[in-house]
Amino acid sequence: MPLQTSEQRIVKIAVPCPLYRVFDYRLPAILGKQTIQPGIRVRIPFGRQKLIGFVIEETLGSEVPANKLKSIIKILDSHNLLGDDILKLLFWAARYYAHPLGDVLQTALPVYLRNNDDAAPLLNTWWRPTQTSHKPASQKYFSMPAEEEVLQTLKRAPKQRQLYQLLLAADDGLDADALNCRTENWRAPLKALLARQLIENFVKPALLTQQNPERGTDSGSDKVKLNDEQTAAIKNIESQHHQHAVHVLNGITGSGKTEVYLALCESMLARNKQILVLVPEIGLTPQLTQRFLARLNAAIVVLHSAMNDKQRYAAWHAAANKQAQLVIGTRSSIFTPLPDLGLIIIDEEHDGSYKQQDGFRYNARDLAIVRAKNNNIPVVLGSATPSLESLNNINEQRYQVHYLRQRANKKPLPKIQLVNLCSQKLHEGLAETLLTKIKQQLDNQGQVLLFINRRGFAPLLMCHDCGWTTSCHRCDAHMTFHKRRNQLHCHHCGSQRRAPAHCEDCGSSNILAIGAGTERIEHFLQAYFPDTQVSRIDRDSTRNKGALQEKLKKAHSGESDILVGTQMLAKGHDFPNVTLVCILDTDQALFSADFRAAEHLAQLITQVSGRAGRASRSGEVLIQTHHPDHPLLQTLLHSGYQAFAKAALQERHAAGLPPVRHLVLLRCESVEAQAAQIFLQQAAHSAKQTDIQHIDLFGPIPAPMERRAGRYRYQIMLQSGHRKVLHQFLSWWAPQLQQLPSARKVRWSIDVDPYDTF
Ligand code: ADP
Ligand code: ZN
Ligand code: ZN
């Protein structure tokens, strides 16, 4: 029977482009009457390009005249690779975040699948002992097992012998990645073993779970006896494993939250369920990942930024095909297909890195909750300092909360004290009393962590004769002085130039470095305590491969006496020897224009404080400030984070800010200030064409940093107490904005639930 021509068959395709619309295409005749699933990738002609688009739905007829209607070049997939639940999540997200659907779908896909037509699993070469070499036919005549025999013959070739043993020990061979994890210089002995036919090649998918040599080596459940609070939390969450609920695991630092995650994972794995664990930054917290790998006897894939596109795709594929049972990853892992998903865990749920700050500006924590709801499964949000959003949801009884109030090691939380900077003698920004305390700790073989959220030597250089300062030519900001490289860096746009030896205004060589960053503190402390080892941990000092690992190792072993770091150090690290934590610059956050600054500062202080006294010795925390009476600090110190959060929520209530009311920012930037202003004026005007009751519109107003990277930046802020109304309005407004004639001259974006208002 001839195939029916499919002239009438037309599908709507979402194209990865910044347009709020889908496009009609003809289906190829070859498809006949076969249905086509939403989410399937297709190659399509688009302008002069050939892009990969996504099938949305089949449609009867099109407004495009038949002779203008283009045909799909090729259907790439046999089924929707993302799975129905992710597709549903993305449709929802496109509307919620008012972002073009094609771009949303593309963001969710592994980079490999954005560019490659073929979605077949990637095959790797693996090696294993040859069957004959370890199970010879003669086996029954010899009492010595065959592998012993082979090992005997390799006695004079220790490298080959070692490699052979590694391959023997693996369940089903090893590939290059797996070998790299276990040994080095293995290529030559491998060649030799292949030549002797003692091992053989085979191909199978690049499955990253095999890379974990420590898998299941730590049966920690035997060692750790869970305390009552941990047991209660596990029991409670467990008892609701079959249904959706959001569980906030609110446990102070060191209270054993990870043990709770592990126990929940073990029981989900026993039920043959898959698990998704989201963490803020894997590179910075290898410890957490290591604990999962070591404890759980499961096929685990880790998605991290050091992986290339192929490795990521292999991990993604393993998850989608149930070869992997557990995925640990950062923000974008929320889009990993997991057909048997039974539990999602979000560690450090308050962390800002869950919010994507460009393109499709989603929040992975919030999407996790929607995904869990759609799938009718539980989600666990863990934190010592839950976000005000989550606390508000607990108050309104949308989320359940489980407290871990004790540290697992029963040590009390360290004592926090304020160091009043007013009229104190300062050494490079460090108070004398602080230096005395540091000396005491060092004399007692303690380890000290100093925390300052500013990289470089000094935030600016200034001419002592005329007041000229090093400002960035492209931003409304100063350029930071990096002494070691004798350069000025703009931390906002990335510009760099040589540090001037003379004032660029008056020519004077009398130039001062104003203020202090990590580099300056490091220099100073090294000179002040010459017999100690000072280690700086920030983005600059850890740029080279392996540098961070090396520094962390020395920090752990206690080889480094003083650690100076940025917020890289605040996240999840467990430094057993730290006895004193100093927080150097709090004043900026106390008076910041950002409405979340106080919350972030309180979280930071609490988190960083948790780094002290984790192991056998108790710890101390010192906070430098010119405003020791500031209510935020007072509440935090005397009543703790919970009390602070309660007060902060009340303030948000009064100010009509999130999470009480909802925020949306329409941002716009342009090299010409006027173009950006005109666009936003037109945008505001268009908003008023419709009924915007229950929505307050402010602006256009300049962004807090009006010029950045050579562009002028303005914004409109929308505020509403009614989510539904707000989103209804946005789905009307966003396409309108695209139509504005001024839109083409500027860069603009919509940010729903913005993390910061810059
Ligand atoms: P958190 O994630 O809350 O910061 P962790 O789970 O990392 O805390 O636990 C901190 C330390 O205490 C870890 O070394 C962990 O092995 C240990 N620990 C956790 N629970 C217990 C327990 N019930 N008994 C003894 N040690 C525990
Ligand atoms: Zn000058
Ligand atoms: Zn700049």
Image: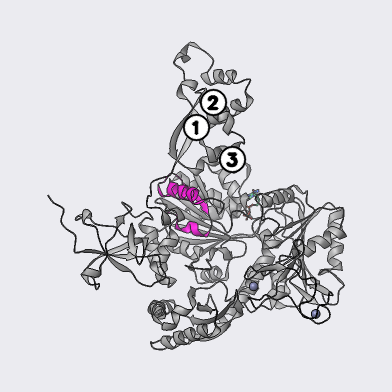
In the rendered image, which quarter is residue 389 located in? bottom right
Q: Which residues are magenta?
A: 307-336
| Front residue (pair 521, 239) | 521
* Residue drawn where x is 16% and y is 58% of the image: 5
| Front residue (pair 311, 296) | 311
Residue 667, how many percent across, how many down?
51, 78
**Eyeballing the image, is 514 above or below 57?**
below
Q: Tell me the element at label 3.
A: helix
Q: Which mark is residue 315?
A: none
Badge 3, how many Cα within 10 Å: few under 14, some, many 20+?
A: few
* Residue drawn where x is 83% and y is 65% of the image: 434
Q: Earlier in the sequence, mark 2 or mark 1?
A: 1
Instruction: Identify the residue under disc 3.
Output: 181
Q: Earlier in the sequence, mark 3 or mark 1?
A: 1
Q: Tell me the element at label 1.
A: strand
* Residue drawn where x is 39% and y is 87% of the image: 691
Under mark 2, the amino acid is: Leu
| Front residue (pair 310, 412) | 310
| Front residue (pair 239, 466) | 466
For the view shown, which residue lies furthest in the top direction? 141
Residue 509, how many percent across, how many down?
84, 74
The reply to whether callout 2 and callout 1 are in contact (CB within 8 Å) is yes
The answer to whether residue 314 is magenta is yes
Query: Mark 2 or 1, which is nearer the eye?
Result: 2
Instruction: Identify the residue under disc 1.
Output: 127
Under mark 1, the amino acid is: Trp
**Eyeballing the image, is 2 above or below 102?**
above
